[in-house]
Amino acid sequence: MKINNNLYLQPFMLGSNQNTTSLLNTTSKSSKQTFADVLQETTNDVKFSRHALERLENRQINLTKEDINKLNSTVDKMAQKGSREALVYMQGTAFVVSVKNRTVITAMDGINLKDNIFTNIDSAAIL
C-alpha cells in the first residue's frame, strides 16, 4: 500500500491459515471485548528482565510452574491494592518486582539476601 508517494506499508500477515482462523475465532467470540482486554489476557504472566534472568541463572535459582503461578497471583493481588514496586519473598528467594509493568527486576537467594537493604519498595509479600 502506498501513502504520500514515498511511504509504503506492508500488509500484516500471520504465519499460517490456522493462526488466522484461531485469531478470527478469538476476536469474534466477544464483540464487547476491547483491544485492551485482549491485550491484558495475553500478557498476564509476569516477565523477567534480562538482569533478573542472569541472576536466576548465576545463582542457580530454579522456578517451577507452580512458583510462577504463585508469583503471578501475588502480583495480581498487589496490583489490586495499588502496589508499584514490591519485594516478594518466596521459598528462600527474594524477587524485586515492578508490579505496574509485571516485571521481575532482580532475584536473590538466601546467601545473597544477607545484609541487603531494599529501597524504593512500597509493598512486600512473604509466601
Image (tube, rainbow, N blue to C red):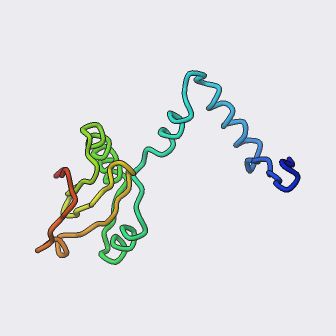
Q: Is residue 86 above or below residue 77?
A: below
Q: Quadrant of residue 7?
A: bottom right
> Taking the image as drawn, is residue 127 in sight?
no
All told, the count of numbered labels is 0
Instruction: Give x and y (percent) for residue 27.
Output: 63, 30
Give the side of residue 110 with respect to residue 56, left or right.
Answer: left
Q: Is residue 69 left or right of residue 92?
A: right
Q: Quadrant of residue 103?
A: bottom left
Q: Looking at the picture, does residue 25 appear above or below residue 95?
A: above
- Which one is in front, 62 or 28? 28
Between 8 and 63, the residue placed more toward the observer is 8
**Residue 17 percent location from the top left of the image:** 77, 42
Instruction: Give residue 52's position: percent from left, percent from top.
Output: 36, 67
In the image, is residue 71 above or below residue 106?
above
Residue at 74 percent across and 50 percent down: it is 15
Left-right relation of 32 to 89: right
